[in-house]
Image (spheres, coloured by chain):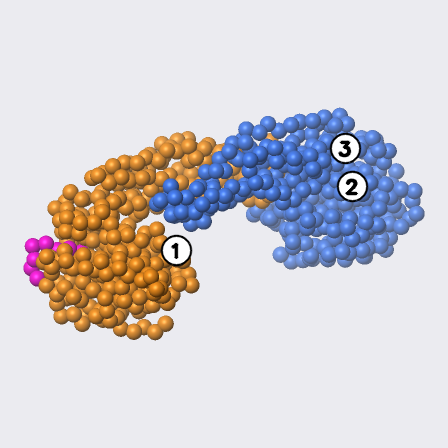
Chain colours: A blue, B orange
Amino acid sequence: MEHRALDLSLDAARLTAQLVDFPSVSGDEQALADAIEQALRALPHLTVDRDGDAVVARTNLGRAERVVLAGHIDTVPIADNVPSRLDADGVLWGCGTSDMKSGVAVQLRVAATVPAPNRDLTFVFYDHEEVAAELNGLKRLVERHPQWLAADFAVLLEPTDAKIEGGCQGTLRVRVETTGRRAHSARSWLGENAIHKAAPILDRLAGYLPRQVDIDGLRYREGLNAVRIDGGHATNVIPDFCAVTVNFRFAPDRSEEAALAHVREVFDGFEVTLTDSAPGALPGLSHPAAAAFVAALGVEVAPKDAWTDVARFSALGVPAVNYGPGDPKLAHTREEHVAVDAVLTAEERLRAWLTA
Amino acid sequence: MEHRALDLSLDAARLTAQLVDFPSVSGDEQALADAIEQALRALPHLTVDRDGDAVVARTNLGRAERVVLAGHIDTVPIADNVPSRLDADGVLWGCGTSDMKSGVAVQLRVAATVPAPNRDLTFVFYDHEEVAAELNGLKRLVERHPQWLAADFAVLLEPTDAKIEGGCQGTLRVRVETTGRRAHSARSWLGENAIHKAAPILDRLAGYLPRQVDIDGLRYREGLNAVRIDGGHATNVIPDFCAVTVNFRFAPDRSEEAALAHVREVFDGFEVTLTDSAPGALPGLSHPAAAAFVAALGVEVAPKDAWTDVARFSALGVPAVNYGPGDPKLAHTREEHVAVDAVLTAEERLRAWLTA
């Protein structure tokens, strides 16, 4: 795939196609980060910083308020869906169309076309969002350069189907493990089968009834799921280990600690090891900056059924919402796509809000 | 390791040490096969054939009965246990001491020291027993040279702890699979978790009561075990597949077909795919040649709790048993060893039977 310069004179939909055709699976974002940095440095009204494969650009107009527009530039692994394809119905197909190169395209278009916004703007483009939390580029920026993220309000352009989504779920992963004793499978009574011992783990998962909870008028749905299972050595050996990786997505009224305690309770009697965890964020829609954004856009407000980096801004004391043209239900699917109209509408709405 | 000529004037225990010090991991048997062929060709009372790294030698005395003495010359990978070591208690340590260079040494000693046995003898030394069944040297001989194996009775000198072991278990493996629908784990209600759907597979395995069955006075124990489980893609994706590999070791009163039908019944409602299968062998101890052997040796008779090449002779219509000086529980272990006394006793017992 050739790595050409980005053309910010294209509208956000065409720019989305260019971004999709520029693969940037987590861990392989450098070329795209270089292209974004190069395109932003060409804009005289912005100052640009770089950390790893994260790029941060800002206006310095001395406005009363500063707003962050943020998005991650990585995608999940490509699934035969690159390059992008525009169909006759005005739908653009491909890896990242929804999650979230359409959002990144909107950020880049606002950066290029709104040199004098009514609020100072900080554009954050970051790496490693689709993988383990400890690699997350925004987490790294929070630790190394928190001043780059200082703002009154933040919008993450994660896919929301053009709704405003307040707050987000928390997420944590644990390994639930069993051990046994190896033996030749011809003399299985000399061993102890660790895979068989995992049966109650799967039973509890299959029988789990996830909670739904209302916060600030928004309904959050939880989920507790095995996302991986591994056990066994050779096909003639009774296995002495089995590990189930479980992902708990929890409503923002639970802290990470409370969520982990709940998971430990579900798997009582098994060895449970936390592998990673990130807090949720309460909707925060009553904050003045968030309320002003909601009023200006006049779109539907909904809860976020996923962990997003909104929670990192939340933890820095910056109220934050998600608003992006992609469809969250299509994220990480082979059939990922976005409507050109939705991308153009998002671009227009943000421009209108920032130039009113 | 130097490859010296084998010295068949050594007793079977010393010869075992010489064979252990002559590494022959599966796939690397050629030098040892050469040495065995050379040693046997030096014996004027034998005719010798060779196929790949299998060597077959026979007497041609026109006796009323012909007996096969068979053994594989390969070992599992060496585990820091070569060269061999004889300790002060008369125990010989090293890779293959039990499985089954002590048995091969007994074969070679009988070949060298019993020029006029009371039954015609066929000595079979073969390769690739410790690896996938399709590579097995005895399987190759059955296909290419079945006439080399023609006999009234066969003894495999596999380790049996000096018991006679009649017949062997059959073995088959299946994959039991579930499918589901991928979705982001933050919106798990849009997906269908294939790992959760595998819960009843593990429940049925954990609750399975293996049969024990008496045949010809020998008790066979079956076993149905998961030997591997795999499912899931990424840690934020609801998995759309899960596969459990199950190994069924079955008593020789079930055919392969009946065994598979039983497994399909256990996993009724799931997709079951056969991956490999080998028949068991009935003990055949009521056959006159087998009964004579049992009577002559006067040792304990027990069932074989593993698949062995006895089943290949059984399928050719040659009743066969296992009888060897090694200890089957030590096979494939780093601590593999054999008592010198046990090797010498096996040598003497076979010689006595064949010269009575």
Question: Which chain letter matches label 3?
Answer: A
**1 or 2: mark nearer the eye:** 1
**3 or 2: mark nearer the eye:** 2
User: Disc 1 marks which amino acid?
Assistant: Thr
Image check: B176 left or right of B211?
Answer: right
Secondary structure beneath dot 3 equals loop
User: Going 84% across and 54% down the picture, which residue do you hit?
Assistant: A47
* Magenta segment: B60-68
Same chain assignment for discs 3 and 1: no
User: Disc 3 marks which amino acid?
Assistant: Pro
Q: How crowded is mark 3: few (under 14 residues within 10 Å), some or many (20 or more)?
A: many
Secondary structure beneath dot 1 equals loop
In the picture of the structure, the residue carrying the numbered disc 2 is A315
Mark 2 or mark 3, which is nearer the start of the sequence? Answer: 3
Secondary structure beneath dot 2 equals helix
User: Disc 2 marks which amino acid?
Assistant: Ala
Between the C-alphas of marks 1 and 2, the distance is 55 Å
Same chain assignment for discs 1 and 2: no
Between the C-alphas of marks 3 and 2, the distance is 13 Å
